[in-house]
């Protein structure tokens, strides 16, 4: 899922204190010749609230096992996000399908100004001060993936300096 992001650093779940947060559970129906077959799909975000986060989708005939499968899937997709003093390094837009998410760094004490699925992802990452706006589709699956798109595009000053082959001072004084 994260191949198109240059700065995406995959993380192993071992040794991390991960907390899982349920974004949503949907009841899905498959209509067959013998009637309707009900199942559940769950989307979950796991994070250590210190810059590591992952998201997963689980499907099953009952809610508990759908959530358990989603948590296992999320642990396979962990990435490190740069956080500077409890907020983001810069403003970033993300999109996935019809969902558009804009995340903006905020001053200390602002809190997480975000709604629904975006809030869940940002809290799991460990961001304490951020502004966000979600536009377009409100489908939680797409909003979570759009938020991840925005977060994975974030780069801190050290990464930019390394990519450009210049010193950290030159990044700020160029």
Image (spheres, rainbow, N blue to C red):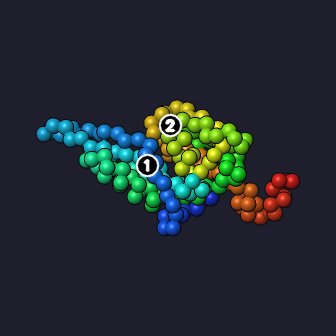
Expressed as whole percent of the image width and height from the top left, the position of residue 103 reads 63, 41
- The residue depicted at 48 percent of the width and 34 percent of the height is 138
Residue linked to disc 1: 44
- Determine whether 104 is above or below 18 in the image: above
Q: Earlier in the sequence, mark 2 or mark 1?
A: 1
Q: Nearer the viewer, residue 44 or 19?
A: 19
Task: Tell me if 167 is positioned left or right of 48 in this view.
Answer: right
- Mark 2, residues whose alpha carbon is within 10 Å: few (<14), some, or many (≥20)? some
Q: Nearer the viewer, residue 129 or 60?
A: 129
Callout count: 2
Q: Nearer the viewer, residue 97 or 110?
A: 110
In this orientation, does residue 161 appear? yes
- Determine whether 153 is above or below 11 in the image: above
Q: What is the spatial separation of the Cα atoms under label 2 and label 1, in whole angstroms?
A: 13 Å
Task: Tell me if 51 is positioned left or right of 15 in this view.
Answer: right
Task: Tell me if 157 is positioned left or right of 170 in this view.
Answer: left
As drawn, the residue found furthest toward the right would be: 173
- Determine whether 41 is above or below 18 in the image: above
In this orientation, does residue 1 appear? no
What is the number of the mark on residue 116?
2
């Amino acid at each position: 899922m994260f191949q198109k992001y240059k700065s995406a650093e995959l993380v192993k779940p071992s040794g991390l204190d991960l907390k899982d947060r349920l974004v949503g559970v949907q009841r899905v129906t498959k209509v067959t010749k013998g009637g309707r077959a009900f199942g559940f799909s769950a989307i979950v975000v796991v994070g250590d609230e210190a810059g590591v986060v992952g998201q997963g989708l689980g499907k099953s005939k009952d809610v508990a096992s759908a959530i358990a499968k989603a948590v296992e899937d999320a642990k396979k997709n962990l990435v490190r996000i740069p956080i500077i003093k409890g907020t983001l390094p810069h403003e970033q837009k993300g999109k996935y399908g019809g969902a558009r998410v804009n995340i903006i760094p905020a001053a200390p004490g602002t809190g997480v100004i975000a709604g629904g699925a975006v809030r869940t992802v940002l809290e799991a990452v460990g961001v304490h001060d951020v502004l966000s706006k979600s536009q377009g589709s409100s489908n939680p699956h797409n909003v979570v993936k759009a938020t991840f798109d925005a977060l994975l595009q974030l780069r801190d000053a050290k990464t930019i300096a390394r990519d450009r082959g210049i010193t950290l001072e030159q990044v700020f004084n160029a």
